[in-house]
Amino acid sequence: MGLHARRYDSATGTVPPLSPTIFIPPPQLLHHHDPYPNSLFDQSYNAGSHNRHESLPGPSFLPLSPPPTTVHSRRDSYPGPFPSPTFTESDSLLLPSTSSPSINHYYHRELYYPTSKRRLCLYDKDSNLAWPFGELEGLDHDDIRETAYEIFFTACRSSPGFGGQSPITFYSKHDACNGDGRSLPVSQTSRVKQALGLRMLRSSLSRRIMVSAPASPVTERSPRSQAVPRRTVTMAEVMRLQMGVSEQSDSRLRKTLMRTLVGQLGRQAETIILPLELLRHLKPSEFNDSHEYHLWQKRQLKFLEVGLLLHPSIPIQKTNTFAMNLKEIIRSAEFKPLDTGKNSDTMRTFSNSVASLSMRSPDDTPTNVCHWANGYPVNIHLYISLLQSIFDLRDETSVLDEVDEQLGLIKKTWSTLGINRPIHNVCFTWVMFQQYVETGQIEPDLLCASHTLLNEVANDAKKERESLYIEILKSVLSSLQEWADKRFLNYHEYFQGGDIGQIENLLPVVLLASKILGDVTNSEERQEKGEKTRANSSEGRIDDYICSSLKNAFEKMMEAANAKSAESETKKEIGEVMLQLAQETEYLALKERQNYSPILKKWNTIAGAVAALTLNNCYGHLLKQYLSEMTTSITVEVVLVLQRAKILEDVLVQMVVEDSADCEDGGKTVVREMVPFEVESTIMIRIRKWIDESLHKGKECLQRAKESEAWNPKSKSEPYAKSAVELMNLAKKIVQEFFQIPIPITEVLVQELADGLQKIFREYTMFVAACGATGIQSSTSCGR
């Protein structure tokens, strides 16, 4: 499946083509200028033409511009259709209740999320994909997730379903009604999903919640019997369920905000020090026991510590009095709950310290914007936790159909967390890629979405030079590249069988990430050194992947062959191992050409030639080592190994020629880079060396005869000398071995051997003749 393959499994009709830009439902009112106009996330969106009983189509992506700071009207803050929850008398009209029996029934968690689902967490410490944002000391994933939800809820408190206005009751986008009042499914598309190439679910989370609850009894004459069923589902409930927040915690948060911010719906979220407000107004009596309250309090204090002292957005002096007071109070509350009563001196000191540290500005000018959660990496941990809520907990490879509304609401936290569009794009890219990895790399749509978002990141990186953004970008891309490099540098191990197709989806993401990272890094180097550097090209990176993976595969073959030889009852000769490796290397080359090269050629036109060159050099190096360790110049075994190497070399050269047919030089450049095995010349050199060694043995035999022969030519018992027998046997053995060598025997070689033997025998006969010509001599004198 290609990277840009799109699936719209559940959508009916014709799906519009993918827009080159991604869209997000617009923010409400903006209080400062957006420095990134005309992005793919910027498209106008006007909700004014819809009445509140209609589902708002909304743009496909949440427009990533700074969040609003003014008071939101119901229509302005309404990103999509939200259902109406019920209320209890104990809750004001500002905060709809989530604890009524009907809501409890509708949202009973077990109805939607099986207990076997993966625990909600930012990242897996044991994952091969390194978490790029560091850790927050003393805070676990649950702490981060709960605080993220509190920030999210506070930022969205004026939106329908969260508080501020009566939630809007609406007709589901997933339902239609025919003439007899029965609901019929209606095709719905999410513009976010359409832009990212994600499929629509067969049933949205909101619909699953509605279907799981029994329908209310309706009489025949009731007006509701002829209308579309109403749904009591809000995005507040969707987010609560997605983030794993209990109804009790949610209820406490709602009531506290109601008491604290009554009459202040227009107050901007970034002007609220949320942990301080919660500590002031939530009492131990509102928790099940003192231990639960203490754990909750420590979480709030810990976030103030990491946000104001450990990772502040504005640097703080170690001698700052407020910082020292805050640190001391937090330490004192480690084992005993902090007294948050109105008459507590400690609480007054604590509140003054927190407020003073939060309301600082870089230039010391007065400000009403709080800086308690916008320091890096605190803000990124919280924001990633919110973004992860878009995935269906029942099927973690799928994104909820409510993603448009979710992202529109999550965007309201930007001012509190110090997020802008470029940082959002990087975080969103990370979330998509991380989900692809953590769900077993089985959903290519997530990879497609990552690639689409990464293109946005590439555009941002060209104009954004803020140091924090660069740090976040480099951390994310380095982690992504490290994970991918590990697999591509050994792709024969990680991509086999049906997984080979993943290369085509994953490689564009990796190459784009590498290009962005290289551009950013080289830009910094040019600024520092004043010189121009060049990033690695895609072709060069593919070359590295091919060479590394094939070398690893070849080494693995060697280890397997050696292990098999060691386990064998009859130990294999090294020549047998070499023959086996040559055969397996040829198979590996053919496998590469058939399975991997067609994919890699999309980014490197001579991928197959590079593979052949790599294998040629791998086996050539091993062959050279083998020949250097041979004690004899040539044997049948050596010749067989060399001849098999020649066959392998011919196959590899043919691969290079075929793969480079479209190149200007027809692959001659690559062929010249191949180190030839030189089989024929090696055989000729070694056989001549063997002839020399054999003739040398004959000369040694002759010399021994001259020195020790005691034969008397006139002896009747010994008609011939013993040395003659020895010399003849040696010559016979040499000739037999010569013709047993499995190579074409040329006349030149035969003549060289014959001339050498003839010379030895001529000298020997002259020696024997000399012994007979002297007449009766002692054996000693003959030997001399």
Image: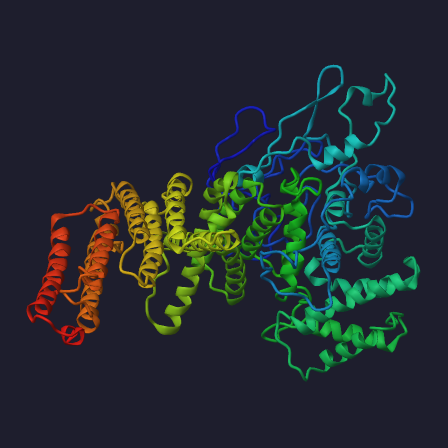
Residue 455 can be seen, yes or no:
no
Foreground of the two, 723 or 445: 723
Vertical position of residue 652 compared to residue 762: above or below: above
Q: Can you tell which quarter of the image residue 176 is in?
A: top right
Q: Can you tell which quarter of the image residue 623 is in?
A: bottom left
Q: Position of residue 287 (x, y in %)?
A: 90, 58
Residue at 68% from the left image edge and 64% from the top image edge: 373
Vertical position of residue 566 compared to residue 445: above or below: below
Residue 445 appears left or right of 163: left
In the rendered image, the residue lying farthest to the front is: 716
Residue at 82% from the left image edge and 65% from the top image edge: 297
Residue 296 appears left or right of 762: right
Q: Position of residue 155 (x, y in %)?
A: 71, 54
Residue 657 appears left or right of 498: left
Foreground of the two, 50 or 231: 231
In the rendered image, the residue lying farthest to the left is: 773
Residue 252 can be seen, yes or no:
yes
Foreground of the two, 596 or 339: 596
Q: Can you tell which quarter of the image residue 52 is in?
A: top right
Residue at 88% from the left image edge and 48% from the top image edge: 91
Give the color scheme: rainbow, by chain, secondary structure or one colour.
rainbow
Quadrant occupied by the C terminus:
bottom left
Q: Position of residue 180 (x, y in %)?
A: 75, 15
In the rendered image, the residue lying farthest to the top is: 180
Q: Position of residue 517 (x, y in %)?
A: 45, 59
